[in-house]
Amino acid sequence: MRVFLIHVRDPQFYALPAATRAANGNIRVMGFPPIGIMSLSAVLKRAGHECVMFDQANPETPDTVIVDAIRRQQPDLVGLSFLSTTSYPYAKLLARQIRSADAQVRLAFGGVFATLNASLVKLQCPEVDFVCRGDGEQLILDLLEHLENPARVAGLTWAKDGQVVSNPNRTMDRNLDQWPFPDRESLPLDFVESMPLDVPAVLSMERFTTMQTSRGCPWPCVFCDIPIFNEGKWRSRSAQHVVDEFKHLQELGYGAIYFVDDHFLLQPKRIEAICDGITEAGVTIQWGCEGRVDSTAQHLFPAMAKAHCRTIMFGVESGSQAVLDRLKKEQKLDEVETAVTNAKQAGIEIVHGFFVVGNPDETVEDMRATFDFASKLRLDTFAFNRLCVYRGTPLWQEYLQRGLVNDAEDWYKYFKCSEIDPTCLPGPVINDERAAGLRRLFRYKVTHYPMQTLRLLRRFIRHMKVRDVAYLIIKPFLGNKSGPTKNEVLSRAVEHGALKDAAAELTQLSEAELEHVMRTSRAERLRLQEEAERWRAA
């Protein structure tokens, strides 16, 4: 059978085209490859099916091109994969365009958000035939075998006689080694590795990809849906299977890999075996991972550095123990300091810290403590994001009980906590404290860790325009300016993805408003294209 797989992206986080093409002629884009559809493509092809992939990061395959290809090639199944609440509006609208062009093609949704909201998604998007829940490898094979009678497909939500039907859950498979390596070569894109910063900072121009060596995380952080999606379980591939994929990727010419594992640093013996295997095989690919600061594998940081681990990212979240306890991080501030110090002493080049501000019950003093704490840590890079809440997380359940959200009306929405929780600081206060905290942090880093700062900037300057690096440095020192109107923000969200906050705005629009914004945005794009054509003709 012929299957089309489409990775629907929230453009706030992806789709930043590079200025030059790769040596193989592919367009370069900054961001993470769509490992989900790449994995499914490999599974489908091994089973004898035909698979065509599209990634919305590719500027040469906009929605119109995808819809036209579906109309011409008439696949048996079109799968739309997306991760989050903020991608959902784009997935809905693309599904409706596809359905308008082809009334017969079978459409399926998959991904974390679709899994956690399957019945509600099916009701809101009747154009979609199937909502796939959980792991997709065996599910998509079973679905193709039973397209005409999907009642036997575990993990599927669909409609029969006008009623939504949710088949029994699929048993969670622990044998991850059974699946082939992702099909990375069939998508005509090359990806550029960057840091998760407000101003995208390029780490290298090596051919970059992602790898998943494990799935799940058992910790109960209130803002995270991973434990619910994975039923509180952690599953891993064998060390040898991971090493074999490293060797395969080196043969294909990849130079950088990032693990998308929710918590790589969980099983020391497995980590040691992976590092030993990489070293013994002579693999030179640089790689990065993320994990918790309370990991018992920290004695392996030197072995990881020897095996070319360049980046470790920690979820620090806060410099206030009271806030960490409120978020149920189950970690201590001294554990954060120890983990960061151990990673740097082991020779890990880039240690990154994720922080959240605007938390429930957080005070101004807590926020200031967070930035002071971050200043003193030997972190190379850091990100301070506003805490948001979405369905499927423990915090959402708390907000339901407190009457701050309504499951019937808000399930597909994405809120900054400070907008709906009276125990949070007001938005303007959070923004002011964050700006002031970043200024203090930058000054401290430059004066106390000058060589560390210079090494990092030298890496960025190697691959970025000087003006972009300068903006990265001076952004925290810029004062508040009058911003765009809400309509301008929404339009930019659709066309350019300029602001992360706009993604949350999109999820809160009604269906009619969302359609209007998309129509207005498309009309504006056409107008600009016509003006450009007239300018060129003149």
Image (cartoon, helix red, strand yellow):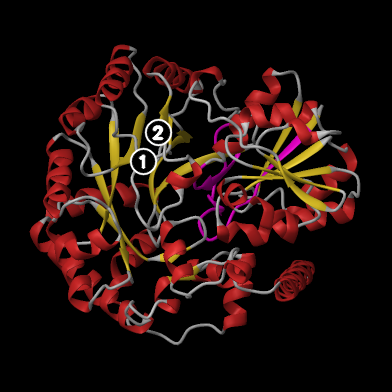
Q: Which residue is drawn at 41% across and 85% down?
A: 481
Amino acid type, callout 1: Pro
Q: Where is residue 446 in the image (x, y as percent from the top left)?
A: 15, 62
Which comes before the other along the chain, label 2 or label 1?
A: 1
* Cα–Cα gap, marks 2 and 1: 7 Å
Quarter residue 373 falls in: bottom left
For label 2, the residue is 234
Above or below, 27 against 353 in this view is: above
Question: Of helix, strand and loop, which mostly describes the magenta segment?
Answer: loop
Question: Which region is colored magenta?
Answer: 3-32
Q: Does the magenta stretch include residue 16?
A: yes
Above or below, 517 against 356 in this view is: below
Give yes or no for contact between labels 2 and 1 (Cβ–Cβ under 8 Å).
yes
Q: Does the magenta stretch include residue 59?
A: no
209 or 312, nearer to the observer: 312
For label 1, the residue is 218
